[in-house]
Image: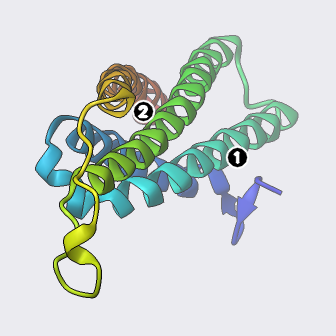
Amino acid sequence: MFETILGLPAHVLVVHAAVVLTPLLVLVALGYAVVPPFRRVSGWAVVGLALVAPAVVYVARESGKAFRSRLQTRDRFPAQLAAKVTRHENYSTWLFYLIIALAVVSLLLVLVARTYRRRIEPPRSDGPGAASAPAPRKGGVLPVLQAILGLLVIGLAVASAYYIFKTGDSGARMTWEGQ
């Protein structure tokens, strides 16, 4: 299923989506966690990238496995290359788990931040009964949870960025060094 697209190895085509969307998730999630004013305009971007980036990394990994199998069956897989591909695959495994964790924590942060914002925003003054609306509540567990999730996003984003680099670098070196 993940072997070829229009006769070309799917991995070399799909990996470009992972190279673009995964760092985008890292950057947008970091911005969302660190810059609260950025949250109003970036929430949907975080949600969309958190849903798409892990899927793209999964497809890139699976297409890479299919590509490896294809090379192994054609006797184009010397031991030196096998070690490099295994290292590249190990980096991609770490990346996959980290990007899933980043996506989940980012989605939770968006949910908590939106819930908290709704609680602290003053009620609208238009409409009947607006004057008798309860005062907004500040404090409680939501700001603490928001801070914890923000710190988790920062840590996971940094770790994900490292493995994005290591995975991409190891794959590019195999390609450009003629292996």
**Number of marks in picture:** 2
Q: Are marks 1 and 2 in contact (CB under 8 Å)?
A: no
The dot on residue 39 is none
Q: Using a 10 Å C-alpha cutoff, classify the residue at mark 1 as few (fewer than 14 neighbours), some (14 to 19) or many (20 or more).
A: many
x, y (%) of residue 16?
45, 53
Q: Give me the C-alpha separation between circle 1 and circle 2.
A: 15 Å
In the image, 75 versus 142, the foreground residue is 142
Q: Amino acid at mark 1?
A: Ser
The residue that label 2 is drawn on is: 168
Q: Is residue 41 left or right of residue 163?
A: left
Name the kind of residue labelled 2 in the image.
Answer: Gly
Q: Position of residue 153 (x, y in %)?
A: 36, 29
> Disc 1 marks which residue?
63
**Number of other residues with Cα within 10 Å of mark 2, as a class: few under 14, some 14 to 19, many 20 or more:** some
Is residue 20 visible to the viewer in this orientation of the structure? Answer: yes
Q: Is residue 179 visible?
A: no
Q: Of helix, strand and loop, which one carries label 1?
A: helix
> Residue 90: x and y, percent?
61, 18
Instruction: Give coordinates of residue 128: x percent, y percent.
Output: 28, 86
Residue 14 relative to residue 171: left or right: right
Quadrant into which the C terminus falls: top right
